Amino acid sequence: MAETVAITDLPGGVRLITLNRPEKKNALTGAMYDAMREALAEADTSDAVGAVVFAGQPGMFSAGNDLADFMGHAGDGFSNSPALAFIRQLARTRTPMVAAVDGIAVGIGATLCLHCDLVYASPAARLRMPFVELGLVPEAASSYLLPLRVGRLRATELLLLSRPLEADEAQALGLVNAVLPADMLVEQAIAQATKLAALPGGALAASRALIRGDQAQVEAALEAEAKAFDAQLRSHESQERLAAFLNRAKPASA
């Protein structure tokens, strides 16, 4: 059985994290979150890894949480979930990160990009953050980072109304560096990551910290979201919405 997250260390100091669950549109399970968290944590302590690239399968970056897997552990609460452990690591990772987004990027598939230093997308990329319609709240500090990037009114539209964001608009809003043909996407992301990995480490780390701004604010927003997410996850409205979504997702014969 193929790994659902493939970790490949490439020449030039680049670690490629490839989501490899195409039959579920790269929906993320607890085990996948754990694998990605460990890969990021190891990158920060490795002299051989200078940059990380996130990629998916052709035509799909990630459908977000695997809700069936997620709800199976919902009794433990969001605060103890592999998803939140990954999100915390994502926000704290010191190694530069690059995303190659082809096709759907839903939920964490979209908010992950807010933490990446460079983001490249194919024309088929489509970002969507449907937290509120599922009775939940934004995560990964997106309620803080997205308004900084695109303004409060636009962020409200994207986060509250879950409006899909196509690749060209994402680029126009400053969420994507460039829109590239799908067959060039990962190659370009790796090439840019290789350039980052070759830069003087001290200057790169200091400059990255200056560009990214107040880390304490990011982490405070992340934790405030996590607390609200946990409360909403236990609410009747969220349970009802998530159950309805899961029932719609089942085959008619199920």
Image (tube, rainbow, N blue to C red):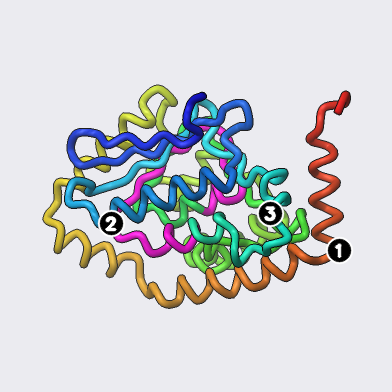
Q: Give the secondary structure at mark 3.
A: loop
Image coords of residue 3 (percent x, y): 47, 31
Q: What label does residue 28 carry, if any?
A: none
**Of callouts 3 and 1, which one flags the residue occurring earlier in the amino acid sequence?**
3
**Residues at circles 2 and 3 in contact by the CB criterion of under 8 Å:** no
Mark 1, Cα crowd under 10 Å, few <14 / some 14-19 / many 20+, is few
Amino acid carrying label 3: it is His
Segment colored magenta: 87-111
Q: What label does residue 236 carry, if any?
A: 1
Q: CA distance from mark 2 to mark 3?
A: 29 Å
Which residue corresponds to the image point at 77% horizontal and 65% vertical from the top-left?
234
Which residue corresponds to the image point at 79% horizontal and 42% vertical from the top-left?
246
Q: Is residue 165 visible?
A: no
* Quadrant hosting residue 180: top left
**Residues at circles 3 and 1 in contact by the CB criterion of under 8 Å:** no
Q: Nearer the viewer, mark 2 or mark 3?
A: 3
Image coords of residue 225 (percent x, y): 61, 69
Amino acid carrying label 2: it is Asp
Q: Give the secondary structure at mark 2.
A: helix
Image coords of residue 48 (percent x, y): 18, 46
Amino acid carrying label 1: it is His
Please indicate whether residue 62 sits to the left or right of residue 71 in the image: left
Q: CA distance from mark 2 to mark 1?
A: 40 Å
Q: Would you name the residue on which mark 2 appears?
A: 44
Vertical side of 11 occupied by 137: above or below: below
Q: Would you name the residue on which mark 3 appears?
A: 73
Say whether residue 48 is magenta: no
* Quadrant hosting residue 253: top right
Say whether residue 98 is magenta: yes
Q: Nearer the viewer, residue 152 or 39?
A: 39
